[in-house]
Amino acid sequence: MKKNIPLAIVIILGFIFVGWTFIPAKWMQDDFYTAFLEFTKTMSPFAVFLGIYSLVSMHYNRIRRKVPKWGYSYVTLTGLVVTATLGFVYGTQAGTPVQWIFRNFMMPISATMFSLLAFYMATAAYKSFRARSIEATVLLVAAIIIMLGQVPLGMAISRSWPINILDISQWIMDVPNLASKRGILLGVGLGSVATSLKILLGIERTYLGGGD
Amino acid sequence: MNFIKNLQGLDRRYVFVFIAVAIIMPLIFPFNSLTYTTTPVENLYQLIDSYSPYVRADDLNGDGIISEEEAIAFKQDRAIFMDFFHDASTMPELFPMEVAVMRHCIYRRVPFFTFTIMEVAAPIIEEAISVVTDEIQKTGRVIERGKDYINIGYKPPALYLPILLGMGDDIAAAVETDTDGNRIENLPMYRDTAIRNYTQMNLVYETSGSDQGLSWMIYARSRFGVNVGVGLTAVMAADQYPYLQSGQCVGMTAGLKGAAEYENLVDMFAMNNLTFSKGQLDNPTEAMMANLDITSDTVPTKFKMARLGMNAQSVAHILIIVFIILGNIGYFLEKKKQNKNL
Amino acid sequence: MHKNRNKSWLSVILCLVALNFSFSLFAEKITVENAKIENFVVEDVPGDLGSGLLLKWKPLPNELKILEYRIYRGITPDSLFYSGSVMLNPVVGFAGEEISFLDSGFKPFVDKSSPGRLVVDSKVKPLDEKTFYFGTANNGYPRDLEVLAQANNKFSLIAQIEKGVYYSRYEEVTLDEQLFAGYPLGNVSVLARVRSGVEYFYSVVPLNETRKYLRPSEVVSGTPISDPLQKPARELYSNLIVDGSTPISLNFDWENATGSYSSQAAIYVFDDELEVTKSYFEATEENPYQGKEPFILSLDPQINEYGKFSQPIISENGAYFLKNEDSQLMIDLERIEDYQVVIQADNGQTLFLKDTPNSRYQSIQTASLTDLPQVPTFNVYDVPNDKGDTQIVVWEKPLVEITKTSFHEKLGKFLIVNYDYYDYQAETLKSFDLKLTLEGQEKPFYETDEFYLDNVIKLAVPDDYDNNTITAEIIIKTNNPDTEPYTLYQNLKFDKILKALIPSAIVKNNIALNSFNYEVYAKEGSPQYVTVAGKVVGKMNNYSDVISYERFLYESVIAFDPESGKVLVPGDIQVWYDGKTEKSLNLSKFASVSKEKIATEITTVEEEIAQITDPKHKERLENYQSSLLALQTELNNNISNRKWIGIVKNHRNNSLRQKSYKVFASNNRGLFTSYELPLNEDGSYQYFTPISNQFDYDKLAGLLASIIFAILVAVYVNLAKKGVDLYIRPIAGIQEIDNAIGRATEMGRPILFVPGMSSIGVVATLAALSILGKVAKKAAEYDTRILVPTRDFILMPIAQEIVKEAHIEAGRPDTFDKNSVFFITTDQFAYVAGVNGIMIREKTATNFYMGSYFAESLLMTETGNITGAIQIAGTDSVTQIPFFITTCDYTLIGEELYAASAYMSKEPMILGTLKAQDYFKFIILFFIIVGTILSTSKITFLLDFFPEK
């Protein structure tokens, strides 16, 4: 029973989605589906509560148990309380403290995290592009051509060649790259249809919480 | 030998340091690197150039050159329309190209409209306009709002499609007022010219970090035959190639590289009041070359932002390529040694 | 570039600090305390008939970092209500000399988000004690009818009422002995616009970047003026249409001025000098008109809407006349260019043909009948497979247009021709032949049959080609077997500046298509055609008319009535429109009033029937009368208001969504032809209603594929259940999962499982969760800690449940720690920072990354690499796969992610689906190969069967 009712809900709602896909009529698209969608919105507030509860309880435990670097948990909890309080008191419009925090803390910190990508990409490229096998060599050569196509040096080199390096890099992107991408996407599409079908038919039930 | 072998097990922190230096140094110490222009950028530049009164006006005194007076006397019959569809997060890539295109328009006296449906982009438009006009006004030329350009500014997204389609008939009726509340038909750029709709406003240049340019191709291009050019972040550029190929998109500036190329073209031709020519591009004159020197003060810093950034990007790219090659040499040497030992 | 952004942020902070210092050093500068708005004026907007005011003021210095100027408006100078704002970017500031705010058009006035009672905006510090500023951050007027009643008659008000509310929530309210429908204020949104002749008071309050309110401006007043229009029309054209030497008609074509609320009253044709003609309009009793009498054509509202009229020329005894009930004028064809044409508006203003801006058209032009546009097709189609809110008006066959050409000089000289095509669902372009001929030659140098429409044709130009003009001949074949192939022409001429061949306009039947525009008119719910699309360019062959389902209804607000506590709107309602008799039935929202009204309506119709002689018309009216009588019977049954409005709603839904169309093809210079739909057999107009379709046939292929796939699954699941051994290719990544968990156990360190960046609604996340179930079970068996940080708070409890169940199944419920599955944050990079922190602090031995990922994948895996963990990733995000492959030990690519849980469970049901999936791939492969072969040999039925999107 604990599993059957949720399963029934999933299956019924799943078939409604199927109907929504194939039936363009107004009764399905507007009257039924749109009204239905409103319900899903009610789920979020409860989940937010759960999320906050989880965050607080985890960090509270960390502080209580004095696990290594527990001091940072204070930072997290302070951030949560301060931002939320400021938001409730002053609102979230432009010019309020919340926006100030967002612009002066969130944005630079996020940008810093994102800029790490440049460094990681460099090391990743350095480590992995080795001509270990024929496939790896192909990958290596393609990578160098594409990168050369992005910088003036590549253009300078290719001016003296009969074939433009930009054309080659474009060809690599358009033909082999696109072909493999499509192959993967085809598999992904089919896999996701299969997974959806498994859920719709009740074969796959992990999402209901463990067990098979 | 040992050095190369050590490279194999190089600590990643050294790589980090190299990359940091490679990115920071070119920004602090600018240097001249070659910027080759690509066809999509050239196409966009050429099209805007072909709208210039310096190309279209009648040579009244018959001296074979369109003088400034002749260009001013010419009744404008072409304009471009710029749609800003991005927020501050993509500004590093898109802002330099917006500045470059506007600068091109102002040097070549091509009237332009600026427009956005994103509230956050309205200040970006103002900033781009002030960057360009402030610098050019220092040279003594007066640039007037409403005469050299019209800033339509922010319009609500709900009006996007109605405006987009309405401009096929009459821009004054479609947008009604500019950002300052002036009616378009009272502004000199509309009142004293032949610019009415897409027939004259024949290029829409849309800058975005998404595929928003598509809506111009689908609605404005297919119905009214307007040319659509796009300015995109480098990440989005690949998606745009099919449209370049099919001709639905006339030109593109992609990422910092596209912006740098456009800056270069503006410095070579527009700044010297020359018409674009492919031949001259390969054999530039001394005057053209002088403007290209980004280490000198000929061109204000604000107008070479993309090339400065591009230097950093190029050096980092080359450094990575060098690392890959060195890494491979080390790998082969090691393998050779292992084979010998066997 | 992101480094750059960091730098700029740093500089912004530094600048702010520096600014603070500079403020304290030079205190005499303009400060937040003493800043004052100057040059604040309120002006009428000229030429808008009193519907707007323009506010202008000098912006405060940019150093003050102004964020917003809030506008307060009132009908008395002492109480002002918030009514809108101008937002600025405080970092950039404002460059111009003047900031303006246009108060025109309908803007939100009061709705359910408004405060319940009058709120004084306490942050504003008024300049004097008598002035009050009301409102909250986003609203001005409160939902208090006592306060709102002051606005009655001071604004133009419109109520926006949701459909459900509109038909159910009104009550009868009597005001000044009239009956109105009253709606509760909480259920309607009211919009307002300023009215001409009313004095409004304004004040502007600046806010700086910390939302500190600066000193408000003085209160300034302004009154919208209903100013007269300068000209009745913008342009006027007139054309004499002749068939050989016989005149057929005199055409008039004018464009009404924009924003014009006056209408054109009459057109005059004079056979006189311009000066004499002018005196006609200046004539008084003392100073009467001396010239010849003109021909006068009175214009009705319908003709006003079209801006076009064709007056037939009557031939009598070899002379030609313009003739109607009012006047007549003999036409001398020789001197037709000397005739004067004048259009007069109902406010008395005139426009002479001589004053038309375009000098070429300042006299009557003569044109031949053959110059008029000919339209081959005119019909209306419903759009298939839709909700039923669009229909297409079609007036021309599908077209192909060459839009651009470019030369490509590599390994020979090539020309790339780009084309576009315009068709519509009812008749689509099947293929076309393109023939290119050099100027002066007869034989085309290039011919092709373009059957796969990819917008591009690449061809080799002859060796001796030297930028000559090329003629392109395009022969079009459509999917309609009854349509004969037809030909279009375009010239490709070399342009020196663009260095490309520039295509000319499309020529069909010797007429350049761009010389005409189309104007589409439709009527619904009224006998008058109104424009739905003006000036559709010549090459467009159809117009999609969207007839939306009503969501909101709009009614003008009569008054805010504090006594009844309602917003009052008119009690009238249009019940139906009868297209056959062109009659609109207007009754009341109240049954009692409707009863009286319908009785009058029936009497009127009866009288009309008595006078009619045409039997068809009579029959239509009698039908109409019987439906009125039926409605009356229902009303006489003493039905309740609620039941009555239910009946009205049904009638409205059915009859107000039908439309009839008319199209003008026009050069906007006096040459035009109108196209109307043929009448029905009973002589009535044809009306069309879009159909709400029950099945989307575009998705038929998708449905069939799904069914076939489901059958395959059923077959293989059954086979698997019967114990048939199904072979599945081993995948390294999955086989390594066990070892990876074992490694963590050996090292005594925890396992990290990242379930992707997406929410529970994404299939990849679900696949990740099923893998989590398996991994957690193994981990529980080995007694190894598993950490699951989530980015989605809905996902968290589900993941918790899964891990808990896994522990129970493994027989180790005691080892389950609820805090091992936790929520970090929804922010992308903050989440990455959190996960990276866990890797470094906890020194996780094995990291799993399953699900969908965006730009952050490398940031996590590279950190995992640094900490030396074994990493197994699985994702369907194609762009992130390279990053995972380079940094992880094993990667499940695309569908392997979905297959992983099947591998690990070895359960027949799931193995069956996997096998079915493999066989389905064969089917896809088959179609790809067959499709390629068929399409290459120009057989496209298979291609057409599959939808494009």
Image: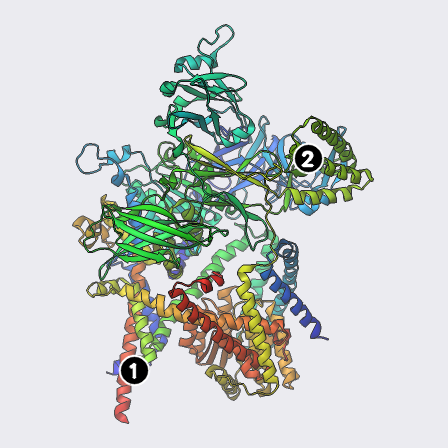
- CB of mark 2 within 8 Å of CB of mark 1? no
Residue nearest the observer in this picture, C530 or C898: C530
Please name the amino acid that badge 2 sits on.
Glu
In the picture, residue C360 is in which quadrant? top left
User: Which label sits on residue C719?
Assistant: none
Q: Which mark is residue C619?
A: 2
At which x and y percent is residue B300? 28, 49
Residue C130 seen by the camera: no
**SS type, badge 2:** helix
Farthest residue toward the top? C286
Most distant residue in the bottom direction: B342
| Mark 1 neighbour class, 10 Å CA radius: few under 14, some 14 to 19, many 20 or more | some
- Asked if residue C265 is positioned above or below residue C892 in the image, the reply reads above
Which residue corresponds to the image point at 74% horizontal and 41% vertical from the top-left?
C170
The N terminus of chain C lies in quadrant: bottom left
Number of marks: 2
Q: Nearer the viewer, residue C143 or C561?
A: C561
- In the rendered structure, the residue with mark 1 lies on which chain? B
**x 25%, y 62%: residue:** A155
Say what secondary structure mark 1 lies in: helix
Which residue is painted at 63% across and 66% down in the image?
Answer: A15
Q: From what the image shows, is residue C425 above or below residue C283?
A: below
Image location of residue C914, percent across then percent down: 54, 79
Residue placed under numbered mark 1 in the picture: B331
